[in-house]
Image: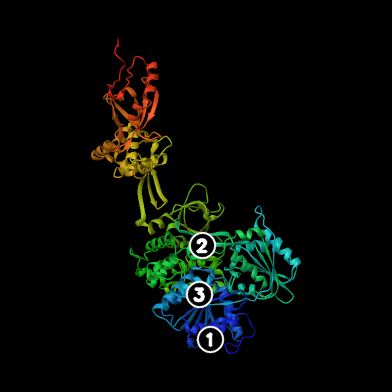
Amino acid sequence: MPDLCPFKTELPIDGVLEPLLAALETSSNAVLVAEPGAGKTTRVPLALLSASWRQDGKILVLEPRRLAARAAARRMAFELGEKPGETVGYRVRMDKKVSARTRIEVVTEGVFTRLVLDDPELSGAAAVLFDEFHERSLDGDLGLALALDVQSALRPDLRLLPMSATLDAAAVSERLGNAPVLESKGRSFPVETQYLGRSANERIEPQVVRAIRQAVSMETGSILVFLPGQAEIKRVADQLSGTLPADCQVAPLYGGLDGKAQDAAIRPADPGSRKIVLATSIAQTSLTIEGVRVVIDCGLARVPKFEPQTGLTRLETVRVSRASADQRRGRAGRTEAGVCYRLWDAAQTAALPAAEAPEILEADLTGLVLDLAAWGTFDPEDLPFPDQPPRAAWTEAKALLTDLHALDKEGRLTGPGKALARLPLHPRLSHMVLEAAASGQGYTAALMALIISEPGLGGRDQDMRVRLQTLERDTSQRAKDGKALASRWLASAGGGAKQLETESAGYLLALAYPDRVAQARGQTGRFRLANGRGADLEPGHPLAAAAFMTVADIQGKAASGRIQLGAPLTMAEIEDLFAGDILTEDVVQLTPEGAMRARRVTRYKAVELEARPIQDPDPDAVTRALMGEVKRRGISRLPWTKDQARLRTRVAYARHNGAADLPDLTDQALLQTLDAWLAPYLAGVTHIGKIDAAMLGNALAGLLPYDAAAQLEELAPSHFTAPTGSLVPIDYGAAAGPTLSVRVQELYGLTTHPAICDGQLPLILELLSPAHRAIQVTKDLPGFWTGSWSDVKADMKGRYPKHPWPDDPTTAEATRRAKPRGT
């Protein structure tokens, strides 16, 4: 392909470069599907340099990770015989190499979001390439949605090219206006797969260590080991220490390492040595680690999961998808035939999920909502996202931004919100830096924002003050780059003196995490957060003795998580920060016996600042406590009389048979509306046992006013008036339906069957003997008189000779008595 670019070696992707260039000559968009090892990441941008439509515009290449961005730029620069920063450069957080000569700029997806928000026309850019788009990161989805919006409104000449090894090309093509799809085979060598299984009764680290030792003894070449996170990497490295042959070099590889350490991990092993790279999913795509021909995959990954109900993002260890497992396996066959050891059984592969869920479906959307508000979009459906964000997470994000005064009630960006959007931080941290800068503490806040957003900087102590001091002393290049970045944030926030004030850490953190102000509860190290959630810290840690603290990082799925980072806070600081949100109220609780205990509590959300016993609580608080106890016990535990229970049953029957305008008196309905119908009748009640039937009767009367009661009586009367004048109750709760149990003699002379609901629904008649024993059940009284009455009469006449048993009961007089004496 000498006419496109002076490539030093031939790669499979070269075969589609000319068709790709031709497609982008006639179409603004295209989709490239290229198998691992094809060379798409480095060859395609170089080939596009010769495109006529590019003129002198830049080609922006988006990578999901900083490591991949730097590696791709270096490889392309090598192909051109240059250094990064000349024709090919990169721009990532805390590191960039670009110049006036740069025409291919490799950036992370987050950096691209800032670029397009700062320059909506993407001035000077000719094309945007979305590498590894199948990963479906939140920033990647946002970047494509914004780029499509730019293209449709401002830059129809802008070329967009999503690229991936595993991609639903048809869906992406449709999203890009039915863009042409080009495919390329990869360059991979055979990979043997061996399944080692995994014991659920043993930690993963020793099992991985045994697999590494097996691979070292049986295989040649370097080894790439996939582990869930940094903690597992450290434990495996510790267990391997001093136990491997001298020619084995152990190299960790994870996001929290500085650039030099990451670059060292992906370089080929020294001559005569082999490398064992202990990596997270960071090494899964976009990278080729020279010399690796063995992969050991534990089958696990650590992914963030956002919980809208708590506002927390927790890290969860999950099984990898089949797509990820295949990508990991493929790393062993990039440069020669290899082997992949999988720490699970072969049959379990089919049970793995097909692919990871897009991040937009499980992420904290606060930054996304703020970015879209800055873009002028207030509804995500206005942009062409591949998947729309979940409404619950969207609503939670808007609520937080409203609390931070970044959005108004209509969801539009405020003045403070515009300032937040200008800082490339999570909105919580932007708010903290801006507020702190205004009070002269911006430097401390900027360093804390750096520690929170760059894992590993400042160490791992749970006390933010310790991390701040550690970071201040750190002279490593990563720390220097980080502190320079924090200084730029401070400058953007208005500047200020670079004076570290560690003792204000908890106060400043509360500006970012007002919902995570925490109060000690019970045992040392146990805390209750303002959002109601529990959190624990090792009792031996000095921070565990704090009365109040602000929690910046918490992990764990249960109601009580593990505090990873925080700083102490005083009550005076809470009162200063949240004066407008601090409430004093009476809290009434009922003992198991139903008696009342009351306290007057001053609180900030779920954090109690002060509490004292009282004897005269607010009557409304007493009523709320009673209502809570009724809800706990259930409606059926109230002291209903039989008549009240029958009334509720009648109403339910009438509603079921067409009288929908009658009030719903079922347990469920009454429980849902408890405060409305029962609370007004509990004035002066201070014990659950004092709720009596009279109160319930008054409450029911309030629910069923005179006209409704009259309607009910007409449709579903409580009693049937027998020919004798007796008022016989109708049982609406009977299993067979409304039932009338009556002595048969009281129905003499009746020629029609008793019915309710305007005569539409016949009653079930349970006909009784003079001794009130059932002798017949019927829904057709006239048919009974003319049918089986003769048999019943004969039987009854023998049993009860003193009672009248006429041959024709329709003409006989109804009676409640036996025959007079002498008859």
x, y percent for residue 375: 39, 72
Q: What amino acid does circle 3 point to?
A: Ala
Left or right of 688 on screen, residue 35: right
Near mark 1 (Cα within 10 A), the count class, few <14, some 14-19 or many ≥20, is: many
Would you name the residue on which mark 1 appears? Answer: 49
At numbered mark 2, what does the secondary structure look like: helix, strand or loop? helix
Task: Tell me the residue at 40%/61% (across/down).
Answer: 395
Judging depth in this view, the residue of 448 and 24 nearest the camera is 24
Q: Name the residue furthest top.
A: 822
Q: Can residue 10 be seen by looking at this rendering? A: yes
To which quarter of the image does residue 743 belong?
Answer: top left
Which sits earlier in the primary sequence, circle 2 or circle 1? Answer: 1
Q: What amino acid does circle 1 point to?
A: Leu
Left or right of 509 on screen, residue 241: right
Would you name the residue on which mark 3 appears? Answer: 484
Which sits earlier in the primary sequence, circle 3 or circle 1? Answer: 1
Q: Can residue 98 be seen by looking at this rendering? A: no
Would you name the residue on which mark 2 appears? Answer: 465
Judging depth in this view, the residue of 513 and 677 nearest the camera is 677
Is the Cβ of the residue at disc 2 closer than 8 Å to that at disc 3? Answer: no
At numbered mark 1, what does the secondary structure look like: helix, strand or loop? loop
Q: What amino acid does circle 2 point to?
A: Arg
Q: Is residue 391 above or below residue 127?
A: above
Q: CA distance from mark 2 to mark 1?
A: 50 Å
Q: CA distance from mark 3 to mark 1?
A: 33 Å
Q: Name the residue furthest bottom.
A: 3
Near mark 2 (Cα within 10 A), the count class, few <14, some 14-19 or many ≥20, is: many
Task: Tell me the residue at 29%/13% (across/down).
Answer: 820
x, y percent for residue 600: 37, 45
x, y percent for residue 335: 68, 76
At numbered mark 3, what does the secondary structure look like: helix, strand or loop? helix
